[in-house]
């Protein structure tokens, strides 16, 4: 489960929410999500 290591903003991301607990996400997609979340933090 990837989301456990990330904060609630990442866990609330649409892509993450669509994943089941046992799905995996590749590094590139995870980085995209983190970039998205960073934009919302400003
Ligand atoms: Zn990917």
Image (cartoon, helix red, strand yellow):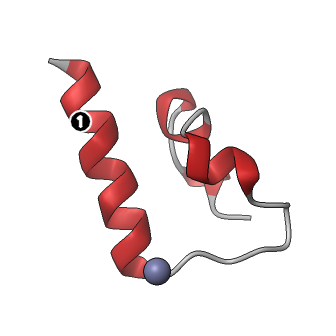
Image quadrant in which you'd find residue 32: bottom left
Toward the left, the furthest residue is 42
Indicate the secondary structure of the residue bearing disc 1. helix
Q: Residue at x 51, y 46 (%)?
A: 6
Q: Is residue 15 left or right of residue 32?
A: right
Q: Is residue 1 left or right of residue 2?
A: right
Q: Residue at x 71, y 45 (%)?
A: 17
Query: Taking 17 as reference, is 42 above or below it?
Result: above
Decide: few, some or many residues near mark 1? Use Cα within 10 Å; few <14, some 14-19, many ≥20: few
Q: Residue 2, how many percent across, how many down?
A: 64, 63
**Image quarter in which the C terminus is found:** top left
Residue 7 vs residue 10, the one in the foreground: 10
Q: Is residue 10 left or right of residue 14?
A: left
Q: Is residue 24 left or right of residue 27?
A: right
Q: Residue 16, how many percent across, how many down?
A: 63, 51
Query: Taking 13 as reference, is 27 above or below it?
Result: below
Query: Taking 38 as reference, is 1 above or below it?
Result: below
Q: Residue 1, how many percent across, how many down?
A: 74, 64
Q: Residue 4, how many percent across, how many down?
A: 66, 50
Q: Residue at x 40, y 79 (%)?
A: 27
Picture mark count: 1
Circle 1 sits on which residue?
A: 38
CB of mark 1 near ligand 1 (< 8 Å): no
């Amino acid at each position: 489960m990837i989301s456990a290591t990330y904060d609630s903003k990442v866990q609330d991301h649409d892509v993450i929410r669509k994943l089941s607990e046992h799905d995996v996400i590749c590094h590139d997609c995870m980085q995209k999500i983190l970039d998205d979340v960073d934009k919302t933090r400003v």
